[in-house]
Amino acid sequence: MRTVGEILSEKRKELNLSLEDIEKETKIRQKYLEAIEKNNFQQIEESTIVKGFIRNYALSLGLSAENVLAVFRRDFRENEKGQVIPRGMVEPLGEKSFCWTPKMTFIFFVSFLIIGFTYFFVRQYVGFSSAPELEVFSPVEGQVFEEKIEVRGKTHPEASVKIDGTLISISEDGSFKEEVTLPRGENFVTVEAVNRQGKKRTFNIKVKVE
């Protein structure tokens, strides 16, 4: 993209005009015209003067002053002292655009591994230090049966299950199903899951056999 100085310099040369000609037309001293063409605005003390010089210079060449000033504002800003400096020198640091870097990729990857391992070990620790999960789908509290009772449920695949103190087999996914026979009347069915550390989880379910 062309700068203000390049636009004005190219147009002046295209019209076969010298800086002396522009000085006579605009009453702007030649050293300031040279500074503008080189984008060396530090030689001009105040930004309002810079903008005025650019406007008059552009008009003397038959250019749109507003368009040329728009290019100037794109590349330069006014600091607290009223001086013109490149825009990048006064942009707040917080306005920098986000840029993903290889270092950030490495940090993200390492963080992901740490979180993954931490989750795994915490889950293993909780599994070893707490009683195994146990769900009993049948029977339900207060259910009435005629004779045999079907006990169905699910636990951790590595746990062992007892029904009324009798060890039963469970499937690879931890599910189990067993039929038990109870005497007539009200009874309690005790379902117990035990893990390798001896942690237990027990359900006592009241049922009735007619």
Image: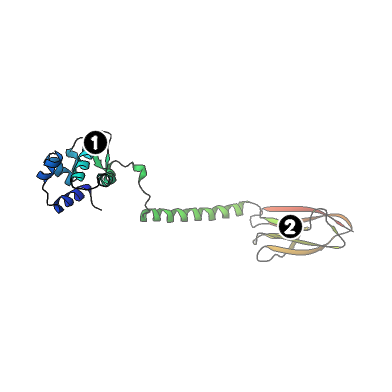
> What residue sits right under mark 2 in the picture?
136
Indicate the amino acid at tag 2. Answer: Val
Residue at x-position 73% and y-position 53%: 202
Quarter of the image for residue 70 reads top left
Tally of marks:
2
**Cα distance, mark 1 to mark 2?**
83 Å
> What residue sits right under mark 1 in the picture?
48
Residue 208 place in picture, x, y as percent: 86, 56
Q: Is residue 27 or residue 72 the one in the foreground?
A: 27
Indicate the amino acid at tag 1. Answer: Thr
Quarter of the picture holding the C terminus: bottom right
Q: Is residue 68 or residue 59 the one in the foreground?
A: 59
Q: Is residue 199 or residue 74 the one in the foreground?
A: 74
Q: Pick whichever of labels 1 and 2 is earlier in the sequence.
A: 1
Residue 131 place in picture, x, y as percent: 66, 52
In the rendering, which numbered label is found on residue 141? none
